[in-house]
Image (tube, rainbow, N blue to C red):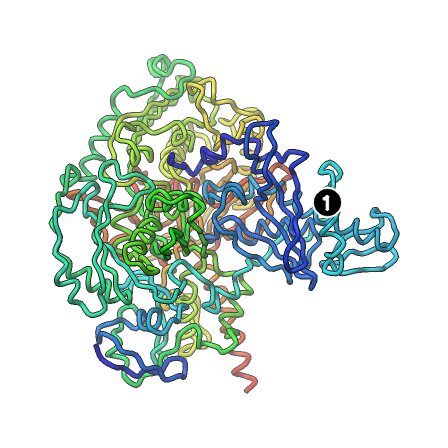
């Protein structure tokens, strides 16, 4: 299967791009439920080219039982964004359901049935806002029609509320009492379905508590490792210490002597390249319980052929990458003539920026449960962001037809892109087949940090020219980092167009001469995507550099950003970027890059943070703005130095334009968490390699911020908007880092050119 | 392997285990109590926090052989109905994002409030420093602890 990049809809879905526009005839399908309820789905999973008969396969559905229970299926994975609440909330609002009594059930992984389930790239709300509204609205129309018929009144005199249909006369009836009528009713013409006025929504655009809050607080919520099956064994794996290492031989005598250890199984790994969806080479110890498996693993004796990555040193590579940026690279975007601008410049600023490898470090380490049954059926329970990819990877690994793999999705104890990759799920399936019993594969923290799909380290060099009149005339950005594609192909030496479209080639400022170049680098570990992907390092470099340019020109950085965005207009990148600007998988006509919207968030954040105020001694503020995943964000960070020289972040201000905000509480919580996440990236976290091995083993080496160091007050201002909704999972991260660095400069007088810096 | 008799949430439990087996795996694997989470195995993240008598401990680094007659309380036993003031405050402030670390956070906070019913913000930060949250819910955790502390204080006053 092709790599599935988070910022694009997956390839398969793209091939059927009409999936996002439900066709008129096939929009709906109704079927009876055994319980006497009815089932309603939106069909936007077109099975073939236009004109062919399309098989019914709803991607999301609502059912109502005769005892008035409204059940809504969540088909996206819940990793902390609140999506398991937010999408059902949309259905419920259009339907007029009593939210307090709505039951949410998690879909299994089934692309035929539910369509795209790849929960990544901040696109769940963007993709499903309209289909969810239509699902709810259609059910409402049908219930109203049934009630109107029963009462012999006009449907126009009826509306729904609290899981009831109400007539203007005061008559009312429970949805459940209409199930018998509605389940045999012909489907309405989709054109006849009207959506509610936005102002009448009771859930959309409001703070709605997450569905699982009570279960989580009670310890009842079920995460990946929490599923218990009769006869289940537990496996831990000793994986190739260096990517590409192969097992020459192993001795399992001592491991098998550990009480509780039942079996030792070798897992064939992919070698080099390691791939995004394959397990690493390893030896698994399968035991009665986790502790016995861990003890057994310690007792394993393995001889490895470590292969070419055993001499890999990341600091050395980063230095080489930095040197390469001084040379001419491969031009990826060009406007005007940067060299001419440089020759004519009164001043040239040249700065370099370095950022390290980052690990996802979800507090829940990867774990998955597989039950391979003798009849060629494999059932999985896994905390996966990408159920279909995991299902496909398991089917491929076990040589099963896709329909023989059943993929159940648990809650995810954090994802951030790590749990898109199905390697750990495949391990569980292979080991269950070998053990002839259900198996839970359990990764330890050391495994997680050693064998992550890391966010790539990066080197960047930016040259900016200012002419004799003080105009900002030229921008030359060199970026180099081992690409995600290199995990699947050794010939991928440059960042992809997609990765560059994440905050680099979409440089929005109105500079007459732009030249963006990339350089070659090779991957010696598994590279993946981490919350906001290459926006992390691109926003760091650009946001810091813009602050320096503003300073060099003697302009306030907020005013400078507003000035350089220019007139309110939609930007076009394609003509200057060899025609491959991705725009996060959306047509730029539908989701334009609008400078006016960016200026609005900048103005708003400056106002809310009282940017122009004179600050007390020992305090400083920094600013940055960055659009990612089609969401506009501006950020101001306040830093403070106390009498003892200790630096803290007392306040953070965000303004965000994500179009229509569906669950405003979860939008705020993503920004609150995003600021914390970005503080770790900026100040405490880094993975470094020596002899091909990550040097950080646990949370003592790979540090993420703790409560005392965390930013204190985080103010999130959501722009009221009727634009199409866009996601918020990733966009909080990128602008925070340069805003923090710029604040640190004002506080200490020293610019930051390398992450992480020590605060 | 040895036999151990331990008290968990007021109930006597008999288990046969390696004396070195951490309490975490006794709870999760042998007693099938899944509310206590595995995060790091080295007492660095706090996801596995339970109470031993009234103390918050990291169950991932506490061998079963060291428990003796001390009483173990897990998230399942913090309140029979799941309505400890902290649990209610957690829902009220919509603290969780992914939720994985939250049972450890709640257990740690509960031990804090047992010792100090009205902690200052600085005391909360210090007491909670051992509990990591990757989603970054720290500020809401703080708010929820303050809310719960107020509820407990009022309850205490009315007795």
- Residue A293 lies in what quarter of the image? bottom left
Q: Nearer the viewer, residue A737 or A101?
A: A101
Residue under label 1, please give it: A196
Residue A195 in percent (x, y) is at 71, 42
Q: In this orientation, does residue A617 appear?
A: no
Residue A283 in percent (x, y) is at 21, 53
- Residue A499 lies in what quarter of the image? top left
State the SS at label 1.
loop
Q: In this orientation, does residue A746 appear?
A: yes
Chain designation of label 1: A
Does A619 sit above or below residue A599? below
Does A82 sit above or below residue B120? above
- For disc 1, the neighbor class at 10 Å (few under 14, some 14 to 19, many from 20) is some
Left or right, A225 with reference to A718: left
Q: Nearer the viewer, residue A684 or B86?
A: B86
Q: Nearer the viewer, residue A78 or A226?
A: A226
How many marks overall?
Answer: 1
The N terminus of chain A sits in image quarter: top left
- Residue B16 lies in what quarter of the image? bottom left
Q: Nearer the viewer, residue B137 or A578?
A: A578
- Tell me what residue is drawn at x 28 percent, y 38 percent: A457
- Tell me what residue is drawn at x 35 percent, y 50 percent: A425
Does A451 sit above or below residue A576? below
């Amino acid at each position: 299967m092709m790599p599935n990049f988070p910022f694009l809809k997956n390839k398969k879905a793209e091939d059927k791009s009409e999936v996002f526009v439900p066709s008129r005839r096939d929009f709906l399908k109704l079927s009876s439920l055994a319980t006497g309820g009815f089932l309603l789905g939106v069909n936007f999973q077109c099975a073939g080219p236009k004109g062919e008969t399309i098989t019914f396969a709803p991607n999301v559905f609502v059912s109502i039982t005769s005892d008035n229970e409204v059940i809504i299926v969540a088909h996206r994975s819940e990793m902390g964004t609140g999506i398991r609440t937010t999408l059902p909330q949309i259905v419920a609002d259009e339907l007029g359901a009593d939210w307090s009594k709505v039951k949410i059930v998690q879909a299994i992984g089934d692309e035929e049935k539910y369509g795209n389930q790849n929960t990544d790239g901040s696109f769940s709300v963007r993709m499903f806002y309209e289909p969810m509204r239509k699902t709810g609205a259609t059910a409402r129309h049908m219930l109203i029609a049934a009630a109107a018929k029963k009462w012999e009144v006009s449907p126009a005199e009826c509306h729904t509320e609290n899981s009831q249909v109400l007539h203007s006369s005061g008559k009312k009836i429970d949805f459940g009492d209409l199930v018998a009528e509605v389940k045999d009713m012909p489907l309405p013409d989709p054109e006849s379905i009207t959506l509610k006025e936005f102002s009448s929504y009771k859930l959309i655009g409001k703070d709605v508590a997450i569905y699982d809050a009570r279960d989580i607080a009670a310890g009842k919520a079920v995460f990946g490792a929490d599923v218990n099956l009769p006869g289940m064994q537990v496996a831990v794996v000793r994986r190739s210490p260096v990517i590409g290492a192969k097992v020459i031989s192993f001795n399992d005598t001592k491991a098998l002597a550990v009480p509780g250890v039942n079996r030792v199984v070798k897992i064939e790994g992919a070698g080099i390249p390691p791939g995004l969806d394959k397990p690493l080479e390893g030896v698994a110890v399968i035991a009665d319980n986790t502790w016995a498996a861990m003890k057994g693993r310690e007792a394993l004796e393995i001889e490895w052929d470590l292969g070419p990555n055993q001499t890999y040193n990341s600091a050395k590579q980063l230095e080489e990458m930095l040197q390469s940026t001084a040379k001419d690279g491969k031009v990826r975007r060009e406007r005007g003539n940067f060299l001419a601008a440089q020759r004519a410049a009164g001043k040239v600023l040249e700065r370099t920026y370095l950022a390290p490898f980052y690990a996802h470090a979800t507090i829940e380490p990867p774990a998955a449960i597989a039950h391979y049954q003798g009849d060629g059926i494999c059932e999985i329970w896994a905390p996966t962001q990408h159920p279909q990819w995991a299902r496909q990877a398991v089917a491929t690994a076990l040589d099963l037809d896709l329909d023989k793999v059943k993929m159940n999705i648990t809650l995810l104890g954090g994802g951030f892109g790590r749990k898109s990759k199905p390697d750990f799920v495949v391990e569980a399936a292979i080991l269950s087949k070998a053990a002839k019993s259900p198996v839970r594969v359990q990764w330890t923290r050391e495994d997680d940090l050693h064998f992550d799909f890391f966010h790539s380290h990066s080197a960047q060099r930016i040259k900016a020219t200012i002419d004799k009149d003080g105009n900002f005339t030229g921008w030359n950005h060199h970026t180099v980092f081992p690409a995600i594609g290199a995990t699947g192909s050794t010939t991928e030496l440059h960042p992809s167009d997609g990765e560059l479209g994440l905050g680099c080639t979409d440089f929005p400022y109105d500079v007459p001469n732009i030249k963006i170049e990339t350089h070659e680098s090779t991957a010696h570990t598994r590279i993946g995507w981490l919350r906001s992907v290459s926006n992390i390092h691109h926003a760091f470099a650009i946001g810091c550099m813009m602050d320096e340019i503003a300073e060099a020109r003697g302009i306030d950085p907020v005013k400078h950003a507003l000035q350089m965005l220019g007139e309110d207009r939609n930007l076009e990148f394609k003509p200057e970027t060899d025609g491959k600007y991705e725009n996060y998988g959306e047509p730029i006509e539908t989701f334009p890059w609008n400078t006016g919207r960016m200026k609005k968030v900048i103005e708003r954040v400056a106002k809310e943070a009282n940017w122009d105020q004179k600050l007390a001694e020992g305090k400083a503020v920094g600013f940055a703005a960055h659009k990612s995943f089609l969401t506009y964000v501006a950020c101001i960070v306040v830093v403070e130095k106390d009498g003892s020289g200790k630096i803290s972040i007392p306040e953070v201000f965000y303004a965000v334009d994500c179009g229509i905000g569906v669950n405003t509480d979860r939008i705020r919580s993503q920004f609150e968490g995003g600021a914390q996440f970005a503080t770790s990236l900026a100040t405490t976290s880094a993975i470094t390699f020596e002899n091909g091995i990550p040097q950080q083993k646990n949370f003592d080496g790979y540090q993420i911020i703790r409560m005392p160091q965390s930013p204190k007050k985080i103010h999130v201002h959501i722009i009221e908007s009727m634009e199409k909704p866009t996601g918020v999972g990733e966009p909080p991260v990128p602008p925070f880092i340069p805003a923090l660095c710029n604040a640190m400069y004002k506080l200490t007088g020293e610019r930051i050119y390398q992450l992480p810096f020590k605060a | 392997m040895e036999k151990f008799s331990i008290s968990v949430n007021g109930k006597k439990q008999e288990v046969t285990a390696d004396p070195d087996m951490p309490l975490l795996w006794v709870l999760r694997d042998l007693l099938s109590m899944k509310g206590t989470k595995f995060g790091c195995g080295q007492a660095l993240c706090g996801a596995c926090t339970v109470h031993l008598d009234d103390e918050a401990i990291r169950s991932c680094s506490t061998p079963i052989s060291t428990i003796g007659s001390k009483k173990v309380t897990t998230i399942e036993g913090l309140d029979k109905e799941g309505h400890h003031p902290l649990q209610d405050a957690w829902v009220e402030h919509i603290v969780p994002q992914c939720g994985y670390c939250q049972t450890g956070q709640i257990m740690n906070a509960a031990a804090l409030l047992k010792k100090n019913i009205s902690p200052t913000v600085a005391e909360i930060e210090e007491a909670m420093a051992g509990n990591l949250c990757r989603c970054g819910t720290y500020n809401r955790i703080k708010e929820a602890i303050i809310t719960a502390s107020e509820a407990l204080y009022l309850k205490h006053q009315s007795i």
